[in-house]
Image (cartoon, rainbow, N blue to C red):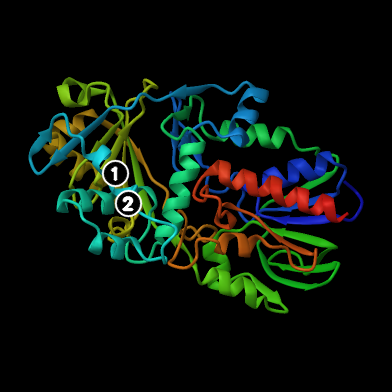
Amino acid sequence: MSSPPDVVIIGAGAAGLAAARELSNAGVRVLLLEARNRIGGRILTHHTPDYPVELGAEFVHGRPLETFDLVRKAGIRLAEMKWKMARRRGNQWIEDDPIMDDVDQLFAKMRIDQPDQSFQEFLDHVDAHPEIKRQGMRFVEGFHAADPRRISVHSLVINNEAEAKADFNRQFRFADGYDSLVKSMSDDINWKSCDLKLNTTVTEIAWAKGKVTLKTAVEAKLHAPRAVVTVPLSLLKSGRLRFHPALPEKEKALQLLEMGPVERVSLCFRSRFWEEKEQLKDASFVFTDDPHFPTWWTSNPLPFPILTGWAAGRYAQALVGLTEKQRIVRALQSLGQILDMDEPNLRGEFEQGFSHDWQADPFSGGAYSYALVGGSHAGRDLATPVSSTLFFAGEGTDSEGNNGTVHGAIATGHHVAQEILAAE
């Protein structure tokens, strides 16, 4: 593309790629800027010689059209998971445990037609067994990466409704890596109408109606009539991306949204030795009370010898500052205790481990978003265009219950592209 851009998109994650795809194919001249040396954002797949290892997004939740349309068009291989859960409390495996059904019943008591409150406040007053409350809290911390004392009950109700619509009980994995979805989006961009600049960090956006000037770390100024901002919430909240003039309505929305912390470690082994335990035969998820990595999952139904340890919320906060090697060691220690294996035997099976610190990553600053009390519609307020000049997308701008998901990010990219085309 030799002509000046009509639109600058900041961020080449799922939302930015989706917007670039739609706009470029409509003949709009797009300049796509990415601070990293790669596209994909919080989708990050490491390819070993034998199999892919996910370091960021891993699951496809339900059958969202935003994802499945790309999957069908590109012929991407998906593997559907079969739900089998194992639970361990203390030194005991718990058989035939109905706790998830009980947690679902607990969540069904949350109401959106009553004043909003935190999930912790909800637990303090709801009539339920203490163990069910404890598992509900663990779920909110683990799945939503949220602080139960801060997350909005209204937002959780909206999330649950969205999950029901998307057939959320079905879960899928990308057989050849989640980055195959990134490639499919990139392949669909009309590159004759779109330029991509990597290693380009935007630090300031000066704007007036119909005019945007960007300052970056590598180029003094870039100009366009419109800009789409898709950077994660943490970057917007930190003030590292400055707007001139300021956007007080956006700042108000950001105060009602938060980025959740997650630490995950994928451990690769010589074999799937854990399946020798009857409780773990064909298991997909393992829930424990380990103080460091309470949640684990296997690669099922894919045959890869990988176990992934997941720490979110306060569990992730406790691991902040560790190096990748230290996180791997800590995960191995936790796994050894869960499997009742001594370190020499576990080390004999272990080949290598992988982990990416999304909290320390300067271009993410966390895992994914959640709404604070009173903020169930703050994502929508953040997404509202400013003077048909500044547009916002990304999973954090979703208020339909799909925040924290790749398909939610893609949907916001599609939506913002339609807003721009309607304003042309």
Q: Marks 2/1: CA distance?
A: 7 Å
Give the class, few, some or many, for how many residues have Cα within 10 Å of label 1's Cα (few <14, many ≥20).
Answer: few
Give the side of residue 131 with respect to residue 18, left or right.
Answer: left
Vertical placement of residue 408 versus 223, above or below: above
Quadrant (top left/top right/bottom left/bottom right) for the C terminus? bottom right
Q: Nearer the viewer, residue 193 or 101?
A: 101
Tell me the residue that label 1 is attached to: 105
Q: Nearer the viewer, residue 247 or 158?
A: 158
Where is residue 325? Give x, y as percent. Answer: 32, 49
Vertical placement of residue 212 versus 367, above or below: below
Residue appearing at x 41%, y 32% in the figure: 169
Residue appearing at x 33%, y 57% in the figure: 313
- Work out whether residue 298 can be spotted: yes
Where is residue 120? Give x, y as percent. Answer: 29, 63
Q: Nearer the viewer, residue 390 or 130?
A: 130
Q: Nearer the viewer, residue 355 or 31?
A: 31
Where is residue 331? Give x, y as percent. Answer: 25, 45
Tell me the residue that label 2 is attached to: 109
Task: Name the residue type under label 2.
Answer: Lys
Give the class, few, some or many, for how many residues have Cα within 10 Å of label 2's Cα (few <14, many ≥20).
Answer: few
- Mark 2 and 1 residues: CB-CB less than 8 Å, in contact? yes
Please tell me the numbered disc located at residue 251: none
Element at label 1: helix
